Image (cartoon, rainbow, N blue to C red):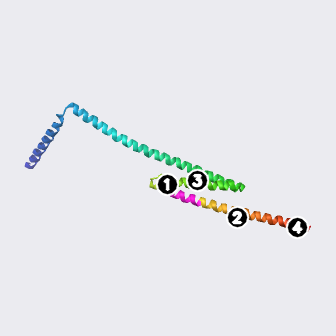
């Protein structure tokens, strides 16, 4: 019980000391209290404003990234359409357009990878980059085979014409 009284006495002394110290704060003039309050509000507004500026910048960067992805999608889609046109009509112009759009897509993915800071997005960009490189390589192989086939067809046509003209001379 004696210990309990000592602790209670010590608690009262601590409370009295706190009241005396906070009482000094209560003696400050109203002008000073208002100035402190307004200063605190201004500080909080400054913190919110700085946070908003950084958030706006981050949002602008993300919007730019999305826009670049849309350009990439459009470029790749156009490459696929040109590829389809080549397959349907064997137009060398369509194949060259597909190759150009494929190169444009690769350039866009390089630009996107430079601006992206998110690790998971960078992994997806790397996978997409590898896919586009394979696609571009395949288009180049198709162009090479197409060129070889066209030259072979021309040679066959030339040989066929020679054979036909020889047959006509013979008859």
Magenta run includes residue 130: yes
Give the magenta range: 126-134
Count the marks: 4
Q: Residue at x 59, y 52 (%)?
A: 76
Q: CA distance from mark 4 to mark 1?
A: 64 Å
- Between residues 7 and 43, which one lies in front from this camera angle? 43
Label 4: which residue? 167
Q: Secondary structure at mark 2?
A: helix
Task: Indicate the secondary structure of the residue bearing disc 4.
Answer: helix
Give the label on residue 104, or none.
3
Mark 3, Cα crowd under 10 Å, few <14 / some 14-19 / many 20+, is: some
Q: CA distance from mark 1 to mark 2?
A: 36 Å
The residue at the far top in this view is 30
Instruction: Kindly report the distance in space between the C-alpha atoms of the residues bearing marks 3 and 1.
Output: 14 Å
Q: Is residue 32 left or right of residue 108?
A: left
Q: Residue furthest left?
A: 2
- Give the distance between the C-alpha atoms of the residues marked 2 and 4, in whole angstroms: 28 Å
Helix, strand or loop status at disc 3: helix
Image point 59% across, 49% down: which residue? 74
Q: What number is the disc on residue 148? A: 2
Secondary structure under tag 1 reads helix
The reply to whether callout 3 and callout 2 are in contact (CB within 8 Å) is: no
Crowd band around label 2 with a 10 angstrom C-alpha radius: few (<14), some (14–19), many (20+)? few
């Amino acid at each position: 019980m004696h210990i309990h009284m000592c602790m209670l006495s010590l608690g009262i002394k601590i409370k009295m000391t706190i009241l005396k110290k906070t009482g000094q704060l209560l003696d400050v003039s109203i002008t000073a209290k208002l100035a402190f309050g307004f200063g605190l509000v201004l500080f909080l507004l400054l913190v919110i404003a700085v946070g908003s500026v950084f958030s706006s910048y981050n949002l602008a960067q993300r919007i730019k990234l999305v826009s670049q992805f849309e350009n990439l999608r459009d470029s790749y889609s156009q490459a696929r359409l040109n590829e389809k046109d080549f397959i349907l009509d064997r137009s060398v112009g369509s194949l060259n357009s597909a190759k150009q759009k494929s190169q444009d897509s690769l350039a866009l993915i390089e630009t996107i990878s430079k601006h992206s800071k998110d690790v998971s997005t960078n992994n997806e960009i790397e996978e997409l980059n590898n896919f586009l490189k394979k696609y571009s390589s395949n288009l180049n192989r198709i162009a090479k085979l197409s060129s070889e086939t066209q030259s072979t067809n021309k040679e066959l046509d030339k040989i066929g014409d020679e054979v036909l003209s020889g047959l006509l001379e013979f008859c």
